[in-house]
Amino acid sequence: MRDEELFDKVYAAILARSDRYDGIYYSAIKTTGIYCRPSCRSRTPKPENVIVYASTQEAERSGYRACKRCQPNKQELINPDADIAERVTRYIYAHYREPLTLERIASTLSISPYHMQRVYRRVTETTPAQQLQHVRIEHAKEQLKMSDSSIQDVALIVGFKSVSHFISVFQKRTGVTPQQYRKGDIT
Ligand SMILES: [Zn+2]
């Protein structure tokens, strides 16, 4: 799933006050500096003020604070599938620089890769591989803006084995090349 599609689904959950993405995605609100569970009953933000994050860590690293009302950082997880998905996402965030395979992630949870992939897809509507790409590209964006590392080095730092693969994934997900991203003010 592309980032815009994911955004639309999470934003629809915000409008509906649906809890289907609670514990899976988080909605940060630019105007308040707060992030919420999508089901939060505080005022409904306009779409242009919302950023969707796949983890509390990502939201907090970007400077957002947890909402006091819906307490998105308190994970009393609702069901075992959401728990599996949360652990997969957390594992990806911790190990995205390394060569990751479905087998390796699944073995840390003591479940089969097939089961893990199915559960993950059902709960998050994306795959572990897509999520891994997302995390790598988000970190690559940071590296491009905040360091002088070459494109090649950035690719390696965030876990890509080949720079050409990195450039093609980056372009597919962001619409611009890493070089263009570094030069411009594109977010
Ligand atoms: Zn909230």
Image (cartoon, rainbow, N blue to C red):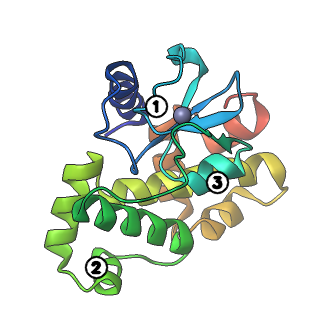
**Dot 3: what SS?**
helix
Circles 3 and 2: CB distance less than 8 Å? no
Q: Amino acid at mark 1?
A: Cys
Does residue 101 appear to the left or right of 32 in the view shown?
A: left
Does residue 63 appear to the left or right of 51 in the view shown?
A: right
Q: Nearer the viewer, mark 1 or mark 3?
A: 1
Q: Residue furthest front?
A: 69
- The answer to whether 1 is drawn above or below residue 108 in the figure is above
Residue matched to label 3: 140
Residue matched to label 1: 40
Percent position (x, y) of residue 178?
Answer: 64, 44
From mark 2 to mark 1, how far is it between C-alphas? Answer: 31 Å
Q: Which mark is residue 30?
A: none
**Dot 2: what SS?**
helix
Number of other residues with Cα within 10 Å of mark 2, as a class: few under 14, some 14 to 19, many 20 or more: some
Q: Amino acid at mark 2?
A: Ala
Percent position (x, y) of residue 22?
Answer: 38, 44
Percent position (x, y) of residue 116?
Answer: 22, 69
- The answer to whether 55 is drawn above or below residue 40 in the figure is below
Does residue 86 appear to the left or right of 78 in the view shown?
A: right
Q: Amino acid at mark 3?
A: Ala
- The answer to whether 81 is drawn above or below residue 99 in the figure is above
